[in-house]
């Protein structure tokens, strides 16, 4: 079963393959912002993939288009609401929902 770790809160969870990062966060009260409710319309769910980028399903067109509008985009940026977990990953939350 894949494992995801969220930084900087340092919380880890075993999840079924195919689960989306944001869904794991919501289910476990991890403070990952999601202003649009997970519909790929805001970019507040931005995460930096610290390890396991190849353990996330590749971004689809919609995510790639949305990320064009993302300030502070990096080579390891993904949108939590769109990223499906396939194996072990470590992600850093950019916008903590405090
Ligand atoms: S929650 Fe809005 S784009 Fe992911």
Image (cartoon, rainbow, N blue to C red):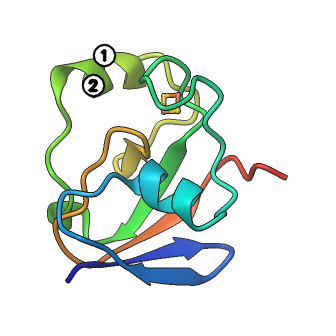
Which quadrant of the figure contains the N terminus?
Answer: bottom left
Confirm if mark 1 falls within 8 A of ligand 1: no
Confirm if mark 2 falls within 8 A of ligand 1: no
Q: Distance between the residues labelled 1 and 2?
A: 4 Å
Q: In the shown orientation, is residue 39 left or right of residue 32? A: left
Q: In the shown orientation, is residue 68 left or right of residue 69? A: left
Contact check, label 1 and label 2, Cβ < 8 Å = yes
Q: Position of residue 6 (x, y in %)?
A: 54, 71
Residue at which label 2 appears: 64
Q: Position of residue 39 (x, y in %)?
A: 43, 23
Q: Position of residue 63 (x, y in %)?
A: 30, 27
Quarter of the image where one finds residue 18: bottom left
Residue at which label 1 appears: 65
Q: Residue 12 carries which label?
A: none
Q: Residues within 10 Å of mark 1 (few under 14, many from 20)?
A: few
| Residue at screen point 49% across, 83% down | 12
Q: Where is residue 51 in the image (x, y as percent from the top left)?
A: 33, 74
SS state under label 2: helix
Badge count: 2
Q: In the shown orientation, is residue 5 left or right of residue 56? A: right
| Residue at screen point 18% across, 21% down | 61
């Amino acid at each position: 079963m894949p494992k995801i770790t969220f930084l900087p809160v340092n919380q880890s969870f075993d999840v079924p393959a195919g689960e989306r990062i944001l869904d794991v966060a919501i289910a476990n009260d991890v403070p990952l912002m999601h202003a649009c409710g997970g519909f790929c319309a805001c970019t507040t769910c931005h995460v930096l993939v610290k390890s396991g980028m190849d353990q996330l399903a590749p971004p689809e067109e919609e995510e790639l288009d949305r990320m064009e509008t993302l300030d502070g985009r990096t080579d390891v940026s993904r949108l939590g609401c769109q990223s499906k977990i396939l194996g072990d990953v470590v992600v850093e939350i950019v916008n903590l929902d405090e």
